[in-house]
Amino acid sequence: MSATIKQVALEAGVSLATVSRVMNGKGPVREQTRQRILEVAARLRYMPHGAARSLITRRTGAFGVLLPDMYGEFFSEVIRGIDLTARSSGYHLLVSSSHGRKGEMEAMLRTMRGRVDGLILMSPDIEAHTLEANLSPGLPIVLLNCLVDGTSFDSINIDNHGGAFAMVRHLIGLGHRRIAMIRGAANNHDALERLRGYRDALRELGVERADELEIDGDFTEEAGYRAGKQILDLPRRPSAIFAANDSMAIGCLFALREAGVRVPHDMALAGFDDIPIARFTLPPLTSVRVSIAALGARAMERLLHAVTMKNQHQRRHETLPTALVVRGSCHEGELPHARPQIAS
């Protein structure tokens, strides 16, 4: 059994209120008294009761982070950015994943009630009424890569459409006219926006779109590997492949190498997200850069601001830019014909 606050107060010769002020870091206490209380608490191995403290302060000292999955470098980088920013402000994280199941997401939202001071949520199909029905009123929330109607919540999104458009324009600028697209998970907002960017770039730059060049995927390496084999079986192969994320591009790269297809000499390859491993593949992967850890950090900064303002702040809706990172899997001079002039 750990010591109680009453035992600490008795041993230190002070009141319960004085011990409470020292442990909570609030209120005036003489330095000599504070040191004596801390020494007694350490000797008795006294640990403040978190639940009792939260009833008094109305703070839990924790933030919730709900993600659709936690597999892969993208999510680990997002969590890293969130965690570093939270820790610098004295907060800890409660992290969970819905694995794409709506019922699981709703159950996790209810579990977070009363346990966190704020929430960062990433979900491809969350709805405003679901949040309102399952969370405590007034809880600060930041939506990350979500498509939710209304302006009740702070939100941060990636320019998925612009990044995909820029990548396909780059491939067309290198002379490619048959560009395959490995799509992301069905009904996922990011995946749909990247697909829209791919299609818009083909249309606006005068390149014909072919249904057989749009291959189903789900953002995993295995899906990229399967898509690569499917592309290789096409009667007329593309000269370039654009995957909706780097994990699928890496899986596809393995399928191409397995079949003896040289990248980029026989077929160019590009991804999206620029996860850390992308620069270490062979050849290094061309990608659309998203500052993933910075995305998580930015979401936590917005949440900390909301908590400081007691959620009485003006909601902000941000779209973070992307940038092309051209590496060895896709470079100029890989096609025999001259590069066409494309308007920027």
Image (cartoon, grey):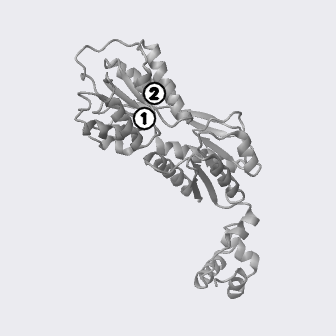
Q: What type is the residue that disc 1 sits on?
A: Phe
- Residue 173 image-quadrant placement: top left
Residue ID at (25%, 20%): 335
Which residue has dot 2 on it? 164
Instruction: Please state, as top left, top right, bottom left or bottom right, where the C terminus lies in the image.
Output: top left
Residue ID at (45%, 36%): 217
Q: What type is the residue that disc 2 sits on?
A: Ala
Pointer 2: residues within 10 angstroms few (<14), some, or many (20+)? many
Q: Secondary structure at mark 1?
A: loop
- Which percent across, then down, holds residue 317? 63, 34
Q: From the viewer's perspective, is residue 184 above or below residue 212?
A: below
- Which percent across, then down, holds residue 269? 33, 31
Q: Secondary structure at mark 2?
A: helix
Q: Residue furthest bottom?
A: 11
Asked if marks 2 and 1 touch (Cβ < 8 Å), the reply is yes
Nearer to me, 39 or 284: 284
Pointer 1: residues within 10 angstroms few (<14), some, or many (20+)? many
Query: Residue 272's mark?
Result: 1
- Residue 181 image-quadrant placement: top left
- Which percent across, then down, holds residue 299? 58, 44
Instruction: Please state, as top left, top right, bottom left or bottom right, where the N terminus lies in the image.
Output: bottom right
Nearer to me, 232 or 86: 232
Nearer to me, 159 or 71: 71
